[in-house]
Image (cartoon, rainbow, N blue to C red):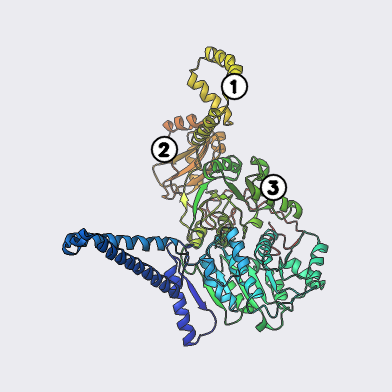
Amino acid sequence: MPSISLVDAMVSTSPKDKKEKKVKNQTLMETLGSDPLSAGKTKKESKSKKESRKRKASDVEDEEEKSETSSELVEPAANSKVKNGEVESEKKKKKKAKVEEVVVEEAKVEEHPNAVSKYRISEPVKAKLKEKGIEALFPIQAMTFDIVLDGCDLVGRARTGQGKTLAFVLPIIESLTNGPAKSSRKTGYGKAPSVLVLLPTRELAVQVHADFEIYGGAVGLTACSIYGGSAFRSQELQLRRGVDIVIGTPGRVKDHLERKNLDLTSLKFRVLDEADEMLKMGFVDDVELILGQVKDLTQVQTLLFSATLPSWVKEIASRFLKPSKKTADLVGNEKMKASTNVRHIVIPCSSNARSQLIPDIIRCYSSAGRTIVFTETKDSASELSGLLPGARALHGDIQQAQREITLSGFRSGKFMTLVATNVAARGLDINDVQLIIQCEPPRDVEAYIHRSGRTGRAGNSGVAVMLYDPRRSNFSKIERESGVKFEHISAPQPADVAKAAGVEAAEIINQISDSVIPAFKAAAENLLNTSGLSAVELLSKALAKAAGYSEIKSRSLLTSMENCVTVLLEAGKPIYTPSFAYGVLRRFLPEEKVEAIKGLTLTADGLGAVFDVAAEDLDLFLAGQENAANVKLEVVTALPPLQEKVQRGFGGGGGGGRFSFGRGGRNGGFSDRRNDRFSGRGRGSKRW
Ligand SMILES: Nc1ncnc2c1ncn2[C@@H]1O[C@H](COP(=O)(O)OP(=O)(O)OP(=O)(O)O)[C@@H](O)[C@H]1O
């Protein structure tokens, strides 16, 4: 169960406040079940429900009494009931069972503890929520709704996909239309906005804008989004006409401020969504400049939300939020910071093998849903999207209009694999993303948490696969800091993937109309008579063809390269360095074969080394050991624990440790061309 803190972060509170807070915390603790997305109810509510259930039960009892009495009157034979104790107790049992039945029924129809109806949400918004299938608030929403509606500043944190957007959208809308902000909200043509939402990416701006349109639009509020890469003029016109809510990326918001298109002096709410990302190096100044437009801080509420709130963000938050701010932290000190609805897997894979391996991972783990593949650089996103069948790329160098087309095509299912940089890591909520693949461990733990959080949203499950090159990358820091216990598995073997594909192909063939048989029968008979294969063997070939296979390759466990086999070398004594292992191999193998081995990595026990050999050279290697004393070579069926690359700087890859084999381009693909500071992440990093 998540720990829940709801604290006044900066000031000591009055005993009354503390008491209220304690009651509220206790209530929330009580009401959150083991499923974090189950919701809570207030004690008062639960008490009144219990009472009403009791009342209903006693009503039933009364009814029973009445009917008994009348039956006694009508049927004298029933007198025996009064005299006969056995019959009497039987009757009581039945009555009790009936009462219990009613209570159970009542409990079934009882509203969800956090039912939307229990909150100060206006009817049109409730209707919209219902339309979207939202009957009850998620915990972060339930925790913070009253706090925000009652006027407090708030720091909100919940794991990815747990509904932080509506946690600010709903109370803001209610405050502006029925709550404290209503009286001071500007109206009429050219009105200055009452709400400013700042967020790190354009795609997120579009998404949050859509939520404000849906729910705010239901009560007459207007919203517009302003972000880089899209036309200035139409944004300017909207701002000049006047809107209630502005959602934007810091760069474009600042530009509109400088051009005097945007007047922030009447703000009632400032929201920093994905706050940590926004406040990362270089952003603080812009955000501060924007927030600094509000002179009277008592008039504005500031809300800060993210799934990850490193301690430095909390410190900075004290500059933007009032000292009386509250913190609703559904992650807190829980070890697991990433989504608990996601299966987190790591698979060894060299960068060369990615494009061969990823389609098989998709086949095995995507459950036929959508997949997002994350790369570290724009160049590798472009390159990989060209290599994966049916995939499209999304990154900061792609024209904004195309970015929007791509994302909407992915949302609507026109294509099922998106290859993206971190522009898609934060906040994006896309239906039915079943699988996330990270091509290598990201640089920081926050990136891992947000990327893997694009699946397993709103209580659904998902799979996040992270590829790593045992010689170059290290994910132990991510594991430690995210609290994720990775499942270590080997790459799916082509033969296993083919088996699954064969089953699918058989189903497809079964559905083909019998009308094709006459046309193909003669050719089939001819094949059967001349091929020397049985009918089953021939049919297997036909299924392979239907599934897109013309051969089954082997795949290395170490690098996931096709047509390679992973071999373990032992030399009868510890192997301290790769060069020692190479020396042992040179004793019995030709130089060019030793040169050709790939990915040599020492085992964690220090007694061996694993490496890949081309499938065609395997026999040569295995036979060669006969000529070398104490040397043992064997094909491994499971990868033994390996020595991790010694890290110099987190996730940096290459160049560093004892076992490094050169950089090989892990970070070599930086594409530094920037056209818009905020198309992705801004000045701090220019990679996506
Ligand atoms: N109360 C609710 N009941 C059902 N679904 C909900 C509820 N609240 C939000 N959702 C849905 O849950 C999904 C995730 O919500 P949202 O995008 O706000 O998550 P988040 O916490 O902001 O995630 P991230 O940290 O990744 O940005 C959305 O599809 C949203 O419509």
Choose the circle earlier in sequence order: 2 or 1: 1
In this rendering, is residue 358 above or below 657? above
For the point 71% across and 79% down, the residue is 294
Give the label, 2 or 3, closer to the camera.
3
Task: Report crowding for label 1: few under 14, some 14 to 19, many 20 or more residues within 10 A (C-alpha).
Answer: few
For the point 79% across and 64% down, the residue is 235
Q: Secondary structure at mark 3?
A: helix
Amino acid under label 3? Ser
Amino acid under label 2? Val
- Residue 515 is tagged as 1
Give the label, 2 or 1, closer to the camera.
1
Choose the circle earlier in sequence order: 3 or 1: 3
Visible residue check, residue 390: yes
Residue 249 horizontal/vertical position (percent): 71, 65
For the point 63% across and 79% down, the residue is 180
Is residue 199 toward the left or the right of residue 22 in the image?
right
- Residue 631 is tagged as 2
Residue 475 horizontal/vertical position (percent): 52, 55
- Residue 315 is tagged as none
In this rendering, is residue 53 above or below 490? below
Instruction: Say which residue label 3 marks.
Output: 382
Q: Quadrant of the C terminus?
A: bottom right
Visible residue check, residue 550: no
Choose the circle earlier in sequence order: 2 or 3: 3
> Given contact means CB atoms under 8 Å apart, are the residues at marks 2 and 1 in contact?
no
Query: Ligand 1, what quadrant?
Result: bottom right
